Image: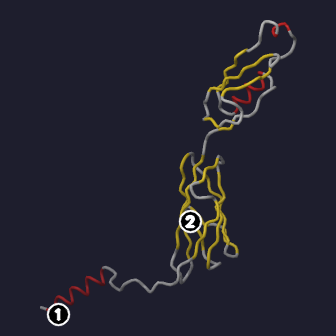
Amino acid sequence: MRVALLLIASLALAACGGAGRPAAGPRVTLKLSAPEDSGTVRAERVQVHGSVSPGDASVQVNGVAAQVEGGDFAADVALAPGANVIDVTASAPGHRSEADAVRVTRDMRVELPDLAGASETDATAKLSDLGMRPRIEDGSSFLDRIIPGELEVCEMQPRAGALVAKGTTVTVLVARRC
């Protein structure tokens, strides 16, 4: 009976890969230098940079092979709007693999340009090109209406430099003299 139990146990171990894990070699060293973890960018793409040891290790960034030269690697990664997780793995023969990840948020807001002094037509076109909804308010007085010249931008709300979502209504105050 004891022999039968030993035979069954050894067969079960062999079927489950009971040979055990091969001796582990040294771990690949992986260091990410860019982009900053938990950083925010407005670009559609980001460059992932870092170093790996041994220098001939292979690196994958989001499952795509990265270029490795002398232990330094780089990869260009497309970002989706909002939060992104970029996975980086490194492996080398005779070494245990290493993995890391960096979180990057793609901010889809648009920075409003300074349009002070621009014509009403140019301001409307520039804001529309940025995906904004311009709303023009004529701030001219009665006397301004008899002065020759084109209406120009005096101020905007939200102000120039503000970060706003596409589709935001931007109020543009125009007059002949600001």
Picture quarter with the N terminus: bottom left
Q: Residue furthest right?
A: 148
Q: Of helix, strand and loop, which one carries label 2?
A: strand
Q: Residue at x 40, y 83 (%)?
A: 21
- Please identify the quarter of the rendering in which residue 161 is found: top right
Q: CA distance from mark 1 to mark 2?
A: 49 Å
The residue type indicated by label 2 comes to Val
Q: Nearer the viewer, residue 149 or 4?
A: 149
**Quarter holding residue 138:** top right
Q: Earlier in the sequence, mark 1 or mark 2?
A: 1
Residue 88: image tag: 2
**Residue at figure coordinates x 86%, y 15% from the top left:** 149
**Residue with the most extreme bottom position:** 3
Q: Select label 1 or label 2 by which is in front.
A: 2
Report the front residue among 90 and 39.
Answer: 39
- The spot of residue 97 in percent (x, y) is 52, 75
Is 76 on the left or on the right of 155, as rendered? Answer: left
| Outermost left residue | 1
Q: Is residue 39 above or below residue 54?
A: above
- Amino acid type of the residue that numbered disc 1 sits on in the rendered structure: Val
Quadrant that contains the C terminus? top right
Q: Could you say where residue 62 lies in the image, as x and y percent from the top left?
A: 55, 61
Q: Please indicate whether residue 51 sits to the left or right of residue 143 in the image.
A: left
Q: Residues within 10 Å of mark 1 (few under 14, many from 20)?
A: few
Q: Which label sits on residue 33?
A: none
| Residue placed under numbered mark 1 in the picture | 3
Q: Secondary structure at mark 1?
A: helix
Q: Quadrant of residue 172?
A: top right
